[in-house]
Image (cartoon, rainbow, N blue to C red):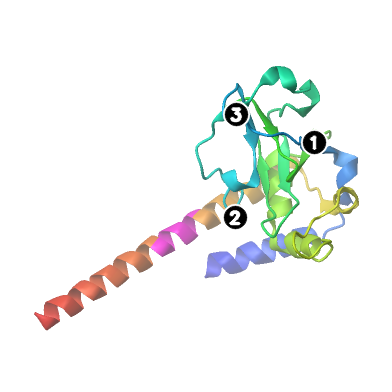
Amino acid sequence: MLFAFYYCFFVEKLLNKKLKTYLNKISTIQTGLFAKPTGIGNVVYLQSKHFDEEGQLSSTLYADLMAHNISDKHLLKDGDVLFAAKGTKNFAAVFENHNEPSVASTSFFVLRPTDKKVLPQYLAWFLNSHTVQTLLKGQAIGTSIPSISKQVLENLEIAVPGIETQKAILQITKLRKQEKSLKQKIDFLREKQIQQQIINAIK
């Protein structure tokens, strides 16, 4: 609990600092590609269903588009940040070069950092932060399928601290996730132990 308190305090302090610029000042923003997967090919067509709520790949990827039908500008590069702008599951994820050659579907905006002082992982963290998610969802349009517009993203203010601070934030976030995971495991084992004790008492 103490770790979580300091984590929230640190993030809030960061977002209140006067280190802000607009997203379109530090990255290009383009829409994903509209295509119909064929089930065969040599390029992966990334869709939001491939990711979990935190932007982690949650399913096996298969190449399902032919490369000769795709413009080079749509091929993802290492460090591109995908932002799921359609639907209720909005998240950001970093594309890494160890993945298969891929393009993003129209569910995503592709953010390509143009400022070397901004880490792609930090950009994804910022977009996934609770404060920013609440802000973006509040500006979504549409009822059946809410959508966050390109203009909203372009005009989003982003706090950009120094590289070392960005790395520190990412490390703290990683430790926070590990803490949550360990707590879940402890709770599960404790519940299992209690249930076993009840069963033994009944016997």
Please, what secondary structure does the residue beneath circle 2 have? loop
Contact? badges 3 and 1 (CB < 8 Å): no
Residue 122 horizontal/vertical position (percent): 70, 45
Mark 1 highlights which residue?
113
Question: In this picture, which residue range is highlighted in magenta?
Answer: 178-184
Query: Residue 26 versus residue 43: which sits nearer the camera?
Result: 43
Categorize mark 1 by other alpha carbons within 10 Å: few (<14), some (14-19), many (20+). Answer: many
Q: Earlier in the sequence, mark 2 or mark 3?
A: 2
Residue 144 horizontal/vertical position (percent): 75, 63
Q: Residue at x 58, y 44 (%)?
A: 50
Q: Which residue is drawn at 74% across and 44% down?
A: 108
Residue 125 horizontal/vertical position (percent): 68, 50
Q: In the rendered structure, find residue 102 and report the number of the disc placed on it.
A: none
Q: Distance between the residues labelled 2 and 3?
A: 23 Å
Q: How far apart are marks 3 and 1 (CA)?
A: 27 Å
Q: Nearer the viewer, mark 2 or mark 3?
A: 3
Q: Which amino acid does label 3 sit on?
A: Asp
Mark yes or no: residue 13 visible. no
Categorize mark 3 by other alpha carbons within 10 Å: few (<14), some (14-19), many (20+). Answer: some
Residue 180 horizontal/vertical position (percent): 48, 61
Q: Which of marks 2 and 1 is in front?
A: 2
Q: Distance between the residues labelled 2 and 1?
A: 23 Å
Whether residue 82 appears in magenta in the rendering, the answer is: no
- Quadrant position of the C terminus in the picture: bottom left
Q: In the rendered structure, find residue 64 and report the number of the disc placed on it.
A: 3
Q: What residue type is labelled 2?
A: Glu
